[in-house]
Amino acid sequence: MHYFSNKTIVLPYDFSELAMEAVDEALEMAEETTSIHVIHVVDPIPAIISIDPAMPVPPSYDHGRFELALKQMQETFGQGKYELLKLHCVIGDPGTEIVDFADSIRANMIVMPSHGRKGIGRLLMGSVSERVMRLSNCPVMILRKPGD
């Protein structure tokens, strides 16, 4: 019996090459009885980015980004070895939404890549994988490129 038999795995997906590699890695680890959920989180545009502070970014802008992301995921994962993946898209803080989603479906594991940001990039961008590891109630597997 394989460890991933009858398990539920969550795969955060941000359209990066590393995220696609994580999906492929998870598919290699999985068996037919493994349920794989791919989730993309649309990080809302803060109102402070608006050109005119009196006119914040409308919620419809984030919803448009949500619709586009879901459509792109359906095109990317709609056939071949990917067609059994369950696709999800939500709007919110990536770290929190990934963990909340994993909790809601009682995931056994979260598998995600690390982008390997260091220094000022990590300070400015934060680390979603680090946040997920801190908040998650299930094991988190972080896939890193050699040398990261």
Image (cartoon, rainbow, N blue to C red):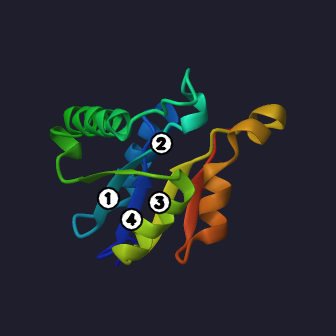
State which mark lies toward you, 3 or 4. Answer: 3
Query: Mark 4 = which residue?
Result: 9
Q: Quadrant of residue 29?
A: bottom left
Query: Mark 2 = which residue?
Result: 44
Q: Crowdedness of circle 1 by 10 Å Cα count: few (<14), some, many (20+)?
A: many
Do tag 1 and tag 4 residues touch (Cβ < 8 Å)? yes
In this rendering, does residue 147 appear at all? Answer: no
State which mark lies toward you, 2 or 4. Answer: 2
- Mark 1 to mark 4: distance in Å? 6 Å
Q: Which mark is residue 67?
A: none
Q: Quadrant of residue 125?
A: top right
Instruction: Give amino acid for label 2.
Output: Pro
Q: Is 139 located above or below residue 77 in the figure? A: below
Q: Crowdedness of circle 2 by 10 Å Cα count: few (<14), some, many (20+)?
A: some
Q: Which of marks 1 and 2 is nearer the N terminus?
A: 1
Query: Mark 1 = which residue?
Result: 37
